[in-house]
Image: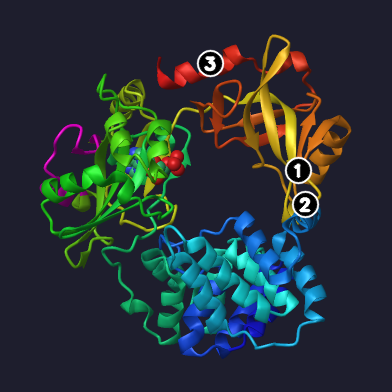
Amino acid sequence: MDYSNLTNTYRELEATTKRLEKTEIISELLKKTKEKELNQIIYLLQGKAFPKWDERKTGMSSRLVLKAINSATGISTTDLEKEWVKKGDLGNVVEEQIKKVKQTSLFKTKLTIDKVFKNIQKLAELEGKGTVTKKIQYIIELLTSAEPEESKYIIRTVIEDLRIGVKDGVIKDSIAKAFSKEPIQIEKAYNLTNDFAEVAMAAKNNKLSDLKMQVGKPINPMLAIKVENIEEGFKAVGMPAQAEYKLDGFRLQIHKNNSEINLFTRKLENVTKQFEEILLIIKSNIKLKKCILDAELVGYSPKTNKYLPFQHISQRVRRKYNIEAMAKEVPVEINVFDIMCKGETSLLDLSQEKRREILEEIIIEEKHKIILTNKIITENKKELEKFYKESLKKGNEGVMIKSTDSNYVPGRRVGGWVKLKPIQETLDLVITGAEWGEGKRANWLSSLTISCKEGDEFLEIGKVGTGIREKENEEGLSFSQITKELEPLIISKKGKEVKLEPKLILEIAYEEIQNSNNYNSKYALRFPRVLKIRNDLSLNDVDDLERVEKIYKKQRKI
Ligand code: AMP
């Protein structure tokens, strides 16, 4: 199929924000797609060339892409950069430039979906030295045959920012509609495979029920709903309930297939290389040859033997070098809490109680290597209260309360599990800087630098963009509203960044306060979120460094 068929669809998708219309557009395309191209089209609609869990990425920075556009069009990178700042979207820049160049070009071979897909896949498959030139060459090859509009989408796909407003939910509904299935069937199949291409193919051939969880491919982890207190917890999961420590590490899905072991994060990133030191433990301390386990990986200090907060191992997740040294600096303990697959058998439909029983039979516990998550089964409020306090005292985040007869439901917050954590205090912080956005946000100040007070000074503690709405008419604070408030406060500009007179105060929620070298307060907020503008406060009311430190210490039980 010609690539233009897909770019026509992209254009139509970009032109509407309505989910139903998007579903209609995609399902029409899927209906007329031949089986052999279904794979490619599904991936390209998601702006990718691989399933979500696949480690391969195109690995092209915007800078490299600029170079490729420069080689394909002859326009200098400085001029391209200027246009880029103006438009906030490299795709639009290339479209316009190719329009100019194309008038003089003589050759034109029609681009096919297959060609675009394969070249983009090749970008991801090239690794190591000397590959940059080859990668650029693959892009140039596409750009020289591309129509202006095609070039726009090629570049956006290469930089992994397609901007057609197609999220997983739309793909799910479109596959359901195209092949006359219920969306829930598609969702279930997706939660087991994390590959819409595989799901679409199965749906087309009426083989959805044949799709199985496979050791080596991550499934979407089961999620928990938040509760405010113990009564709510019991109410949600029934009695007796299984309570476990809620550890402050990161979720790890362990796939063991004899000596082949793969480790995935909650977002399905493959982190096997980063945690090589635990592979031996998995080989020796798990009695099954083949299984999928759910666990929390927790860092501890080799000096004090105490658990360390998440931020310490968070550095290990993305580490590509010095992995061994890091493993010594922040060793980790595997805390296993569930089992989803034993040999060839799925355990998803077994009860929590049964799955835990199996787990207890197959793990050889060894402190600081692998243990089962601490748990109690209780119907007594006081006992659970005591367990919760004990967990917090040990530096954990809180407790998970699980229904003893709940199945393992991948990817959904269905209520079989709930989480209980102390309510986080909010901070009142002032905006001292911002950055002009890109794409849809091009005319808005979108990444806001927030600061706390220290004497007469303001010290930066993070950047926030979450909690602000893109649309005006929705409830809550919008980007255009905040931009209007901030524009008169601009003191200086540098590229896309602006410095602002400290005036506008925001109430900020966050998950946690961490140490950080990125900001001059030496602290950073994890997952900050704007709650509201605090026009009722003055600069005197902005929270000071002392309060930040106090919350930090309280949180760490220092
Ligand atoms: P939250 O990130 O607040 O939505 O809480 C869910 C996360 O808590 C899970 O994704 C796990 O990474 C983590 N967690 C810690 N301890 C447990 C446990 N015992 N059972 C399940 N999840 C846990």
Q: Residues within 10 Å of mark 1 (few under 14, many from 20)?
A: some
Residue 471 location (% of width, % of height):
76, 52
Q: Are marks 3 and 1 in contact (CB under 8 Å)?
A: no
The image quadrant of residue 329 is top left
The mark that comes first in sequence, 3 or 2, is 2
- 528 vs 209: above or below: above
Query: Going by the image, does 104 lie left or right of 364?
Result: right
Amino acid type of disc 3? Glu
Residue identifier under label 1: 496
Q: Are marks 1 and 2 in contact (CB under 8 Å)?
A: yes
| Image depth: mark 3 or mark 1 in front | 1
User: Which segment did they paint magenta?
Assistant: 356-376
The mark that comes first in sequence, 1 or 2, is 2
Q: Residues within 10 Å of mark 2 (few under 14, many from 20)?
A: some
Q: Is residue 456 magenta?
A: no
Ligand 1 quadrant? Answer: top left
Label 1, label 2: how far apart the Cα atoms are: 7 Å
What is the count of numbered marks?
3
Residue identifier under label 2: 85
Residue identifier under label 3: 549
Residue 217 location (% of width, % of height):
33, 64
